[in-house]
Amino acid sequence: MTLPTVLPAPRAILFDLDGTLADTAPDLAAAVNWLRTERGLPPTPYSVLRPTASAGARGMIGAAFGLAPGDEGYEELRLQWFDRYQETMAVHSSLFGGVTELLLGIEQAGMSWGIVTNKPARFTDPLIPQIGLSHAGCVISGDTTTHPKPHPEPLLEGARRLGIDPAQCWYVGDDKRDVEAGHAAGMVTVACNWGYCGAIEPSTWGAEYLLDTPTDLLQTLREVVEAARTAERAA
C-alpha cells in the first residue's frame, strides 16, 4: 500500500527488532519448549509459536502453556523462560535476508537508522552485537523509557538520540502496535509482511506501506527520495 501523494524523504528509519530486522523466533521458541520438556511435555510446534514471537514471553508462554499474565503459574514460567532465553538467545537467530543490504543502502543514502524494540535491555544489549547490528545509530529497549510500545515515547526517544525530528522518521515493524506507536509519534509507518505479524492481518493496521521484503523497503525508499527530489525541482 502506498500513499497517493508524494511523501517527503525521511532522514531516519527506525526499526523494530524481533521479526523486523532479525529472525529471533527459533531461539525464543526453543527456550519455551525447553520449559515444556523440563515438565515432561511434548514441544509445541514451531508453526504455532512463530506468529507469537513479537509478543515475547507473553506470546511464547501463551502459545505453549495457554497462560496469560495474572494466571497462576505464569510468572514462574516467565522468569524461567527469561533465564533460559538469555543463555541461548543467539544460537539460531540471524538477520532476515536482505536486511544487511537494506541498512547499507540507508547509510549510503545519507540517512540514519536505529532500533526501537520492546525487548528488555537484558536481552537487547548482548544480542545486537552477536547478530551484526552494533552499528545502529541508537538502540531503545523496552525498558529504556517509562512506557513500551504502543506508547510513542520509545520512538520519540529514538528520534531524539538520532537528533532528527520525528516527522522526518519512518518506523518499520511487524506488529500492529508498531504502527500504532509510529502514528502516535507522528512518523510514517511500514508494516513488514516478512515478519511474525501475529493474528491480525497487516493490511488492516493502517500503515502507509505494507511491504513483503527488506529489498522492497529499500526500493520504496529510493523511489520516495527520487520523487521528493523531482517535486522540489518542479516547485
Image (spheres, rainbow, N blue to C red):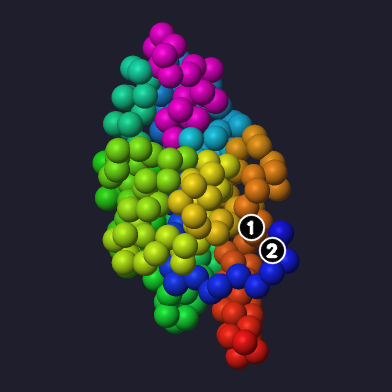
Identity of the residue drawn at 65% across and 73% down? 6
Q: Depth check: 202 or 150 in front?
A: 150
Identify which amino acid the numbered label 2 is placed on: Leu
- Look at the image and tell me in which quarter the C terminus lies: bottom right
Q: To which residue does mark 2 refer? A: 3
Identity of the residue drawn at 30% across and 38% down? 146
Residue 68: in magenta span: yes
- Furthest residue toward bottom: 233
- The mark found on residue 208 in the picture is 1
Judge from the rendering whether residue 13 lies leftward or rightward of residue 120; answer left or right: right
Total marks placed? 2
Q: Which residues are magenta?
A: 56-74
Residue 49 in the image: x percent, y percent?
56, 33
Residue 78 in the image: x percent, y percent?
36, 24
Judge from the rendering whether residue 149 lies leftward or rightward of residue 136; answer left or right: right
- Residue 104 image-quadrant placement: bottom left
Identity of the residue drawn at 58% across and 42% down? 176
Identify which amino acid the numbered label 1 is placed on: Glu
Residue 66 in the image: x percent, y percent?
53, 17
- Look at the image and tell me in which quarter the N terminus lies: bottom right
Badge 1 element: loop
Badge 2 element: loop
- Residue 159 image-quadrant placement: bottom left
From this view, report whether residue 77 is shown above or below residue 160.
Answer: above
Could you tell me if the residues under marks 1 and 2 are in contact, i.e. CB atoms within 8 Å?
A: yes
The CA span between labels 1 and 2 is 6 Å
Q: Depth check: 162 or 142 in front?
A: 162
